Amino acid sequence: MRKNIVAGNWKMNNDLAETQTLVTELKMHINSSNCEVMIAPTFTNLWHAFEALRTSKIEVIAQNMHFADNGAYTGEVSASMLKSVGVKTVILGHSERRAYFNETDEMLAKKVDAALKNNMRVIFCFGEELADRKAKNHENIVGSQIKNGLFHLNSAAFKNIVLAYEPVWAIGTGETASPEQAQDMHAFIRKTLAAKYGDEVANEVSILYGGSVKPGNAKEIFSKPDVDGGLIGGAALKADDFFGIVKAF
């Protein structure tokens, strides 16, 4: 049975003191839930967050990593470094990494391989831009990103893969994605997986929605049959909002 997941991506927010405050608030709020709960602080605060949440139900995860084990890659972080501070899950392919840091499908496939080689779980992100949606090319874009990033894997690897669909066109553009649009794309994603790996694999993979989930819309979005949770941005930075989303399950 696939898992329900709410993962908070803090992005480049919160210094150490702010991280301490938010982690303390989350620990007080979230001591039990009907879903897996994750937070992704900045690299500099991963160890503190892990130590503070060691006995809680909240998993501390990373926002990114490099595909190499080590070497002359100034400013980068490897899978083994993440594991050494207690991190076992990493977000890869986030729309901001693709857009601002020119991460390609080929590069992301290598990152996925590195994470799996190190027995880490991957939250693999993908999604279309506004121009793609308006041109009705969204399924082609999403299908291509999934195939290029993941379809070199064998079926067993998907036990450690979580998918996260980000409708980039609905984030900060004034456009709005409906729960029905989310369900339609999630169903397409599952169908794409099934065509390659079969229904059993497709039905076991959790697919998260990353399109501005908030406490007010989370329950309706999460009620859709192919939506297994959310990858949360801004709302993850406020304990009450994040808790409200977790409670949607």
Image (cartoon, rainbow, N blue to C red):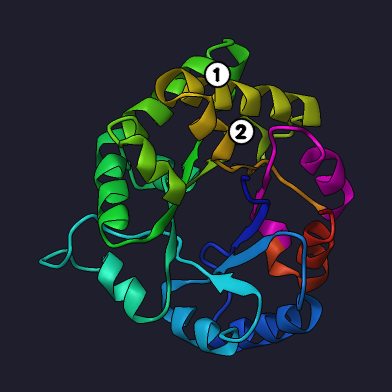
Image-based side of 194 in relation to 181, left or right? left
The reply to whether residue 165 is in sight is no
At horizontal 25% and vertical 54% (from top left) the residue drawn is: 114
Residue drawn at 45 percent across, 84 percent down: 47
Which residue lies at the image location 32% right of the left edge and 41% below the top edge? 102
- Say if 163 sits above or below 37 in the image: above
**Which residue matches tag 2?**
167
Residue 35 lies, in percent from the top left, at 71, 59
Magenta residues, as a range? 215-235
Q: Can residue 201 be seen in the rendering of this structure? A: yes
Callout 2 amino acid: Pro
Q: Position of residue 235 (x, y in %)?
A: 73, 59
Mark 2 or 1 closer to N-term? 1
Q: Where's residue 129, x and y in %?
A: 54, 28
Q: Which of 150 and 108 is in front in this view?
A: 150
Asked if residue 52 is positioned above or below residue 106 in the image, the reply reads: below
User: Separation of disc 2 and disc 1 at Cα?
Assistant: 9 Å
Residue 84 is inside the magenta segment: no
Label 1 environment density (alpha carbons within 10 Å; few <14, some 14–19, many ≥20): some
Q: What kind of element bears circle 2?
A: loop
Badge 1 amino acid: His
Which labelled disc corresponds to residue 239? none
Which of the 4 image quadrants contains residue 207?
A: top right
Label 2 crowd (10 A; few <14 / some 14-19 / many >=20): many
| Residue for badge 1 | 138
The residue at the point 35 percent across, 47 percent down is 101
